[in-house]
Image: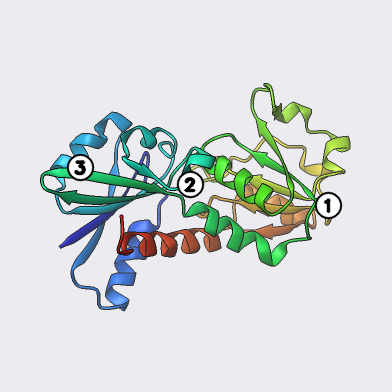
Amino acid sequence: MKKFGLIGYPLGHSFSQKYFTDKFIREKITDCSYENFPIKSIKEFPDLLRNNPDLCGLNVTIPYKEEILKYVNITEDVVDEIGAANVLRIKRENGKTYISAHNSDVNGIKDSLVPCSRGKGYKALILGTGGGSKAVIWTIRKMGCEAIMVSRTARKGVLSYRDIGPEILANITLIVNTTPLGMFPDLDSKPDLDYSLLSSKHILFDLVYNPEMTAFLKIGKERGCKIITGMKMFRSQADSSWEIWNENEL
């Protein structure tokens, strides 16, 4: 039996186990299973590998998309450029374990944004500076647009939420939430923006998919914004993960 799974903490919000279990049933894949592995520290990862010798692949979520890289042998170019991975492929040979790191988030982000794209050259606010934000920034820049990072604390190259006033939002087309704010079970939380400044000229994209309609997106919709939920990204990156796990070469 080939085992796949998800590491992160916490994992109560995740649909991954159900998504892949349903896929295996629907496609009559009888030699695979998918489990959640909620680890409180990335230091638990080596023990997880030792205790699960049938583990062939993992998805990686908050907060380990960056920290996981210290445990891998091979990284694809996009992972090197971004500095974060959300897919691991695991191969065991002659008593040794080889782990390759990949990033399927970029496929999910592009698949979500392209149908709503307003061409090259627009500016995007990226809320959050974690592993997910790195994939968003990389993808948006590859699409020929400018990404501006926002966090709770300003620093070189990063604005704070207090900096986001009318003069900045007037020149922004896309706002992407890459933080866990609004994720189940903390349904009422949202990024600390002045939502009264939003209008129909803005596109709001939330990487959170549980719930699909987050507080961030609800207010945006009320303000007339175009909204993009995280569900399409979730499905796209999950399908890309499966392709990575089943490639012939490590």
Write down the quadrant of residue 10 in the picture: top left
Residue visible at 81% across and 43% down?
Answer: 196
Q: Which mark is residue 49?
A: 3
Find residue 43 and report its image quarter.
Answer: top left
Observer-side mark, 3 or 2, equals 2
Q: Quadrant of residue 37?
A: top left
Q: Residue furthest left?
A: 95
Q: Which residue is mark 1?
A: 199
Q: Residue 110, percent across and down?
A: 60, 59
Residue at image location 26% in from the left, 36% down from the top: 45
Which amino acid, mark 1?
A: Ser
Residue 189 rendering spot, x and y as whole percentages = 59, 40
Find residue 77 and name its label: 2
| Figure check: 80 above or below 25 | above
Circle 2: residue type: Asp
Q: Nearer the viewer, mark 3 or mark 1?
A: 3
Q: Could you tell me which secondary element the residue under label 3 belongs to? A: helix
Whether residue 93 sits left or right of residue 241 in the image: it is left
Mark 3 to mark 1: distance in Å?
A: 48 Å
Label 1 neighbourhood size at 10 Å, few (<14), some (14-19), many (20+)?
some
Mark 2, Cα crowd under 10 Å, few <14 / some 14-19 / many 20+, is: few
